[in-house]
Amino acid sequence: MILGVIADDFTGATDVASMLVRAGLRTVQTIGVPQGEIPPEVAAADAVVVALKSRTTPAADAVADSLAAQRWLQAAGARQFYFKVCSTFDSTPAGNIGPVAEALMDALGCSFTIATPAFPDNQRTVFKGHLFVGDVLLSDSGMRDHPLTPMADANLVRVLKAQTRRKVGLIDHAAVARGEAAIRERMAALQAEGVGLAIVDAVSNADLLRLGPALKDMPLLTAGSGVAIALPANFGLAPSGQAAALPAPGGLQAVVSGSCSPATNAQVAHFIAAGRPALALDPLRIAAGEDLVAEALAWARRHIAGGPVLLYSTAEPAAVKAIQGRLGVEQAGALVEQAIAAIARGLAEMGVRQLVVAGGETSGACVQALGIAQLRIGGQIDPGVPWCHAQSPAPHAPSAVHDGLHIALKSGNFGGERSEEHTSELQSPFLISYAVFCLKK
Ligand code: ADP
């Protein structure tokens, strides 16, 4: 293993894993810190991304979980560590970016690290230490009103200072634009001033690629997924299709959807309009104690031989509000997630080996119900949506996951509508089943 990544949430982990694969590293994502022996798939990977849920937990818990991940990655052979944070630097004065970065620095005996969420491909740029989301400062973006991590200050030096004991500095664009030697010079000057963490300006991929060589010997990087594009060259690797290669897909195909986001609503409508078999799941019937899971699986068994089927609770905002009014927001969410997760498991037992899951929380529930401990990351179907291969030795995992299951986890508004000609680029039936779901009429 070359690179050990500690990601502070599940979709953030998939995001950076997908970037690493595109940059040429064979990458596996684990769900939490793996227990027991190192599985062969993990041992064969260039990069392993441990997905934690530490972005908004109490700082002490985030530190403990991150250190456990770091110890496991180190034992598995990681040579460099990457603490993956959100590209909008989601955190509060209590943490968790600062406390986790410092704890990892202590564990690795590292006196200096960079911290930059710059991700120009995703419209996240940093200039003079200020983070821009698209054309506006972070503090003028929707992140200002985030329920858990409101970001009211775009000055990342100030934001990080509030969370750390160490001195925070800036590697500004003037240094980044001049390349490796100037960046190293700036790093040395900052370290001489006693700076432990430095925000880095980057407004383009070219900036990140200039930064990459200067990071070669740094034990710990703290960054969003943007920096991932600049690392493989340090290990003598170049982008190639090889890193994304997964075992050949086979078996039955299905889509389950618990996402009610506008893109998913459009995708479900398209799937139905295309005349493909789709079954709506009514949360009120689940709440009434009806065995909707058994009913849904019996329905799927009747239709699935003919191609992908869709089972969905996806609904328009007014309908969701009405259900939430009757059941409560959390109760409705949990009931639907559990039902869809049980359906996903039943589908795997039925012989589904290619599964698309729509919805971030829904994906978490399905991955858990399927007993998936790790995912090998394949090519990108859509920005932010890689296709993956799961093979889990977990004792409670259904047989499908033992055999291997191709799965795409599509959160919220991901998955653009596709035109017919795009499908010809998709080389596997699995990708086509995804495309069918996301295809433009
Ligand atoms: P997204 O990625 O689009 O946000 P999530 O799966 O993260 O999707 O969140 C959707 C939430 O809405 C889940 O908790 C899900 O169980 C819940 N949900 C799904 N369908 C309905 C529905 N018809 N009524 C109420 N809640 C629903």
Image (cartoon, helix red, strand yellow):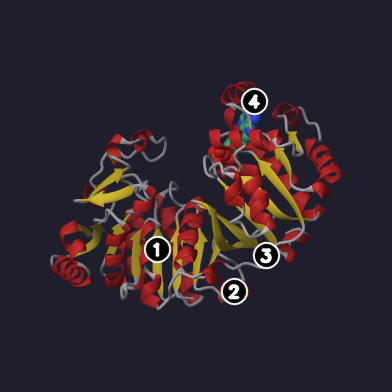
Q: Is residue 347 above or below residue 83?
A: above
Residue 38 badge: 2
**Eyeballing the image, is 97 above or below 333?**
below
Viewer-proximal residue, 4 or 288?
4
Specify the farthest residue to the front. 421
Nearer the observer, disc 1 or disc 4? 1
Query: Looking at the picture, how far across and down is residue 371, in whole percent?
Result: 68, 57
Task: Tell me the quarter of the picture where residue 183 sits.
Answer: bottom left
Identified at 74% across, 36% down, the residue is: 275
* Number of the front mark, 1 or 3: 1
Query: CB at mark 4 closer than 8 A to ligand 1?
Result: yes
- Which residue corresponds to mark 3? 391
240 displayed left or right of 106: right
- Is residue 236 shown to the viewer in this render? yes
Q: Amino acid at mark 3?
A: Gln
Q: Horizontal and vertical percent for residue 192?
A: 14, 69
* CA gap, disc 4 and disc 2: 43 Å
Secondary element type, mark 1: helix
Check contact, mark 1 vs mark 2: CB within 8 A.
no
User: On the image, numbered disc 1 is attached to which residue?
Assistant: 228
Which sits earlier in the primary sequence, circle 1 or circle 4? 1
Q: Which mark is residue 327?
A: 4
